[in-house]
Image (cartoon, rainbow, N blue to C red):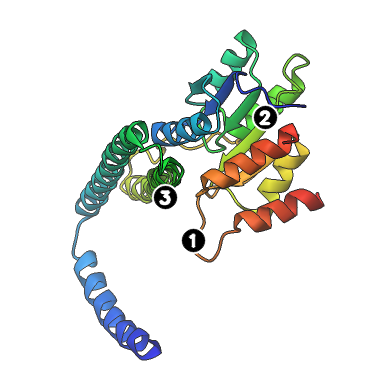
């Protein structure tokens, strides 16, 4: 795995150099167009995820109604697990929102540099002091057991 | 306080999928009297019109977050004792502690499962 990582890093460096060369030959408006198209892709991801989650929930709710009485408890547990897994839509949406906000800021800086208004829906200055990061990266956010311990200790 | 399965429960989340998930889980737990709101402002208005036995709220919503809703609820004499569970992707220590200090009854981090929701509701009502 480390070797694969090193190989990827070498490719990445080459790739990054190549991308940098290509990016510098694009005009600001072309770069903004690329970013706006990226935002559209993200919106499409969110929409697709919503549709998929809705279809899964439709099926799961239908199954609950037909769960065989003898195996009802097992079926019910499995169906509830399917339903809670549909929470992926919420987490995908929150991550997409984070990325969208970052891209909005990049676009605003480009527009500002190009002499146009750089303000795009900035959060009010008196926004909550607590920073909201949304879902953390895998392995870097606290799980329910940690949250429960914090809750007990405070 | 004992749980009353016919009590109205309010789910607050800006993602309809999450509302559907929680509604279905509550239904399996015996709670059929469930309303929904898409953000804190709508939820607060609904709470001022109807007595809810439990609020289950997301944090990240606009224009009013779940944390702001919690603070409004706890500041309102009529609403202040309403049991309130935060269900959120926010898992940083400072957020959990802030919610606890603001008076949240329990805190669930997403993604979660049916057993976790049940245990947090049971913990509030002493089941």
The chain carrying label 1 is: A
As measured in the structure, the alpha-carbon distance from the residue carrying label 3 to the one carrying label 2 is 24 Å
Of the pair B101 and A143, the residue shown nearer to us: A143
As measured in the structure, the alpha-carbon distance from the residue carrying label 2 to the one carrying label 1 is 26 Å
The reply to whether label 3 and label 2 mark residues of one chain is no
Q: Quadrant of the N terminus of chain A?
A: bottom left
Q: Residues within 10 Å of mark 1 (few under 14, many from 20)?
A: few
- Horizontal and vertical percent position of residue A145: 65, 57
The reply to whether label 1 and label 3 mark residues of one chain is yes
The chain carrying label 3 is: A
The chain carrying label 2 is: B
**Horizontal side, residue A83 vs residue B50: left or right:** left
User: In which quarter of the view is residue B56 placed?
Assistant: top right
- Horizontal and vertical percent position of residue A94: 43, 45
Picture residue at 57% right of the left edge, 32% below the top: B57
Instruction: Find numbered disc 1 in the image and state the secondary structure of the residue it sits on.
Output: loop
Of the pair B61 and A147, the residue shown nearer to us: A147
Name the mark on residue B70.
2
As measured in the structure, the alpha-carbon distance from the residue carrying label 1 to the one carrying label 3 is 10 Å
Of the pair A38 and B15, the residue shown nearer to us: B15
Q: Residues within 10 Å of mark 2 (few under 14, many from 20)?
A: many
The reply to whether label 2 and label 1 mark residues of one chain is no
Instruction: Find numbered disc 2 in the image and state the secondary structure of the residue it sits on.
Output: helix
Name the mark on residue A137.
1
Q: From the image, tell me which residue sits under label 3.
A: A95
Instruction: Find numbered disc 3 in the image and state the secondary structure of the residue it sits on.
Output: helix
Upstream in the sequence, badge 1 or badge 3? Answer: 3
Picture residue at 53% right of the left edge, 43% below the top: B114
Residue A129 in view in this figure: no
């Amino acid at each position: 795995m480390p070797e694969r990582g090193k190989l990827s890093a070498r490719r990445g460096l080459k790739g990054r150099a190549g991308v940098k060369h290509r990016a510098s030959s694009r005009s600001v408006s072309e770069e903004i167009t690329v970013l706006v198209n990226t935002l559209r892709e993200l919106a499409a991801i969110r929409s697709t995820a919503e549709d998929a989650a809705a279809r899964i929930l439709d099926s799961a709710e239908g199954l609950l109604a037909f769960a065989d009485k003898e195996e009802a408890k097992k079926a019910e547990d499995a169906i509830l697990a399917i339903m809670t897994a549909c929470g992926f839509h919420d987490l995908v949406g929150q991550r997409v929102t984070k990325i969208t906000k970052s891209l909005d800021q990049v676009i605003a800086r480009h527009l500002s540099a190009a002499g146009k208004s750089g303000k795009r829906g900035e959060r009010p200055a008196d926004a909550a002091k607590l920073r909201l990061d949304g879902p953390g990266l895998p392995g870097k956010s606290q799980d329910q057991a940690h949250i429960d311990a914090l809750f007990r200790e405070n | 306080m004992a749980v009353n399965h016919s009590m109205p429960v309010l789910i607050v989340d800006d993602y309809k999928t999450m509302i559907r998930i929680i509604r279905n889980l509550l239904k399996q737990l015996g709670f059929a009297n469930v309303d929904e709101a898409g953000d804190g402002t709508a939820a607060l208005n609904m709470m001022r019109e109807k007595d809810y036995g439990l609020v289950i709220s997301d944090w990240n919503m606009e224009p009013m977050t779940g944390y702001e809703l919690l603070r409004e609820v706890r500041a309102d004499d009529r609403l202040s004792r309403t049991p309130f569970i935060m269900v959120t992707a926010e898992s940083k220590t400072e957020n959990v502690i802030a919610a606890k200090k603001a008076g949240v009854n329990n805190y669930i981090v997403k993604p979660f499962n049916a057993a976790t929701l049940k245990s947090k509701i049971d913990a509030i009502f002493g089941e």
